[in-house]
Image (cartoon, rainbow, N blue to C red):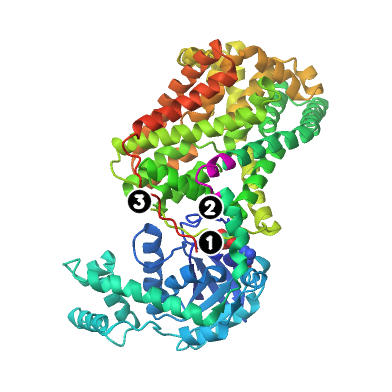
Amino acid sequence: MKELVLAGNPNAGKTTLFNELTGARQSVGNWPGVTVEKKQGKFTYQDENWVVTDLPGTYSLSPYSMEEKIAGAYIVEQRPEVVVNIIDASNLERNLYLTLQLLELQQPTVIAMNMMDIVDRWKIELDIKKLATKLGVPIVPISASRSEGLEELRSAIAEVSKKPSLGMGNPVTFSEDIEATIAKLMKEYQLDEKESRSRWQAIRVIEEDLDVCASLGVEKLHLYDHERTEMTHLRYRYIHDLIDRVMKRPERFESMTEKADKILMHPWFGLPIFGFFMYMVFTMTFTFGGWLAGPVESLFGWVSVSVDAILTQLGVAEWMISLLTDGVISGVGGVLVFLPNIAFLFLALSVLEDSGYMARVAFLMDRFMRKIGLSGKAFIPLLMGFGCSVPAVMATRSLESDRDRKAAMMMIPFMSCGARMPIYLLFASVFFPGKEALVTFFLYFLGVLVAVLMGTIFKDTLFKGSGDPFIMEMPTYHIPTMKTVGRSVWEKVEDYIVRAGTVLLAASVVLWGLLNFNMQGMTEMVNSFGAQLGHMIAPIFAPMGFGNWESSLSLVTGIMAKEAIVSNIAIIFGMGEAAGEAALNGNMSGMLTGIQQAFPLAAAFSFLIFSLLYTPCLATLTVIKRETNSWKWMFFSAGYTFAVAWVYAVIGYGLAMKFSVLVSAAVLAFGTMGMIAFRTRDKRRKEEVEWEQL
Ligand code: GDP
Ligand code: MG
C-alpha cells in the first residue's frame, strides 16, 4: 500500500479533498484547528491501493505549535510516497510559504491548486504551467468542493509515485552566507549529502527545531538568529517575485469582501452585529421549531399510545409497558421532539461558518481578548464549544503554550453547547412565551461572559502570562455550498440522534428504575429511590428557588449528558399525569402543566442559568482528563463550574424575585461585564492587534 499525505494551510480545503478522495465524511471547518488529529482513509487508483493521511493545517513547518510539529515530523519520519500540498489559489502569498518548506524536505510532491472556481470567478489570471516550472513540481488545478480536477490529480499522484525523481527541488536561492552555514552544519553533524533529508536537517538546526536539534545533539541555541531571519525574509521575497510573474489580478475584485468587512468587521459595531445575527438565528430556531412542534409531539403521543395498546393486547407485563412508554419513549422522545429546532440551529451556524463569517468573529474576539490579556487563538476552541465541548477541548491543541491550553479548557464548558439547547427550548417556551429567542440569546451571552471572566481570573492566578498573538488569514466570503453545509448539519443531527439512542436511552432506563422502585420493590414515584435521592440533595438547590426533588434529581443525571435533564423532566412530569390521558394529548401538554406547577418563574430563570453553567457532562470531563493527563484538572473543572453556577443561579434567583426577569438578566450580564472591566483595568493595552488580511 502506498501512502499519500495531504499538507496545507488551515482552510485550504484539505478535509474537503480528503473526503473527495476517500469517500469519508470528516467534518469540514472554516477555521484552523478543526483537524487536529491526523486522519486516515483509503482509495484505489489503477489497481494501486493508497492510504491518505489528512495532516493538521499549518502555515509553516516551523515548529511553533503542536500542529506544526505533528505535520513536519510526520512527513520526515514516515516518508510517504507522495506529499500532496494543497494550496488555496485565492490566497497564494500565504500558502506558498509552506510549499517552499515542503520542497526543502525533498520528497516527491504534487501541488493541488485548490479553489480554482474562485480564481475563475474573480477573473484572476494564474499561469499554472509557469508556476510548475519555477517550483519544479507538477501542479494540478482543482476545485475540491465541486469535485473538479480530481481525476487529473489522482493520475498526477500515481505518476509522481512511479518516477520519484520528478519534481524535487529547492527553488529559493539562499545567500552564500546561509549556504555556507548549511554546509558547515552538515559537516559538523556528519549529515550525508546524498540523503535527501540532510539539507533539511541542517536548515532545521538554523530554525531551531528542538526535536531535530535534540536528535543531532546540538547543544547551543541562538547561534543562527541572523541566518534564520534572513532565510524567512528570502523565502517571502521569493514568493513575492514569483507571484508577480505568474499571477495577474483585476483591481476591482477584492472589493466585495472588503466592502462587507468595512461593516462586519467594524471595531465597534462588529461584535454587536454578530450578536444581532445570533439573535436572528435563535428567533428563527424557535419560529421554525414552532411550526413542526405540533406534528412531532402528536407523533410521539401516537407512538406511545400504540405501543401501549399493542403490548396490552399481547399481554405483556404492566411494568414492562411502563418502562417502554413512560421511560424510554418519554425520555428519548422528550429530547427528540426538539430535533427540528436543533437541526435548524445547526443549519444556521453551518451557513455562518461556511460563508467565512465565523472566522471573522474569531478575529473580532481576538482583538477583544488580547486587550484583556487572553490568547485570541483560544477563541476558536471556544467558538467550537457552541457545538460540543468535546471537540472544542481537543482543538485547544492548536494553542502554543500549555498554560493557554489549560485556561481554554477550563473556559470551554461555559460555552453553551448544542446539548443544552433542548433545555432552553423547553423552559423558554413554557415560561417565557414570545421571549424565547431573547432568553436563549441571554443564556449564550452570559456563558461567554462568564467564560471570559474566569479566563481573566485564571490569567492572574493559575496560568500567569500574556496572550500570544493570533495571526490567521481571513477566507473570502462565499456562498455556502449545499454539500458542505448539508454534510455538516447531517453529521450533527446524526450525532444528536445517536446520543438519544444510546446515552439518553440508558439514562431514561436508569431513571425509570429509580422512579419506580425502592428497597421494598415496585412503588409509587413519591416513595421511590429517585424521590429519596432528590430530597437528599434538594437543600443544595433550595437557595435557587427550585428545592424540589424532581429538578434536583434531573440535574444530577444531567451530568451524564445535558439533554438528560430534559429526558428526566419528561419522564418525571409525564409519569405524574394520568398516563392514558397524557398520552392522548401527546405526552407534552400534561408534562408542561407539571413543570409550570413545579417552578415559580424566578426559579425557572435560575434553573436555566444553573443548567448553563454547572459541571460539564461526563464526555467533556473524560476528554479534559485525557488532554491534561491529570485527574486534578478534571475534578477541578467539575467542581469550580458547579460553584460558579451555584453563585450565579442564587444571585439570579434573588434578582428575579424582586425584579422582572428582563431586568435580572440585564443586571447579571452587565454585572459580569463590569467585573471583567474591573479585573482588566490595567491590562488593557493600547497596542492594536496586528492582524493580517491578504
Ligand atoms: P481544511 O481546513 O484545509 O481542512 O479545509 P476544509 O476542507 O475544511 O475547507 C475550508 C472551506 O473551504 C470550507 O468552507 C470548504 O467548503 C471550502 N472549500 C474547499 N474547497 C473549495 C473549493 O474548491 N472552492 C470553494 N469555493 N470552496 C472550497
Ligand atoms: Mg480540515
According to the image, label 3 marks what residue? 468
Percent across and percent down for residue 108 are 46, 81
Q: Position of residue 578 (x, y in %)?
A: 75, 14
Amino acid of disc 2: Ala
Secondary structure at badge 2 equals helix
Q: Which residue is mark 1?
A: 11
Span colored in magenta: 265-273
Q: Amino acid at mark 3?
A: Asp
Q: Nearer the viewer, residue 485 or 250?
A: 250
Point 64% across, 24% down: residue: 427
Counting residues from the N terminus, which is met first, the one under dot 1 or under dot 3? 1
> At 63% across and 36% down in the image, what residue appears?
279
Q: Residue 281 location, x and y as percent?
A: 66, 40
Badge 3 marks a residue whose secondary structure is loop
Q: Position of residue 160 (x, y in %)?
A: 51, 84
Q: Is residue 102 above or below residue 320?
A: below
Query: Which secondary structure lies at badge 1?
Result: loop
Instruction: Give the residue at the far left of this rendering.
Output: 220
Q: Residue most toward the front?
A: 251
Please name whichever residue, 375 or 77, is drawn nearer the observer in this view of the structure: 375
Relative placement, left or right, of 210 versus 627 is left
Whole-angstrom CA distance, mark 2 to mark 3, is: 18 Å
Determine which of the numbered discs, if any, sits on residue 359 in the image.
Answer: 2
Q: Looking at the picture, tell me which residue is in the foreground, 583 or 93.
A: 93
Relative to 363, 206 lies left or right: left
Q: Which mark is residue 131?
A: none
- The answer to whether residue 166 of the structure is visible from this angle is yes
Q: Is mark 3 within 8 Å of ligand 1?
A: no
Label whose residue precedes the other's in the sequence (2 or 3): 2
Mark 1 neighbour class, 10 Å CA radius: few under 14, some 14 to 19, many 20 or more: many
Q: Badge 2 local density, few (<14 within 10 Å), some, or many (20+)? A: many
The answer to whether the beta carbon of the residue marked 1 is less than 8 Å from any atom of ligand 1 is: yes
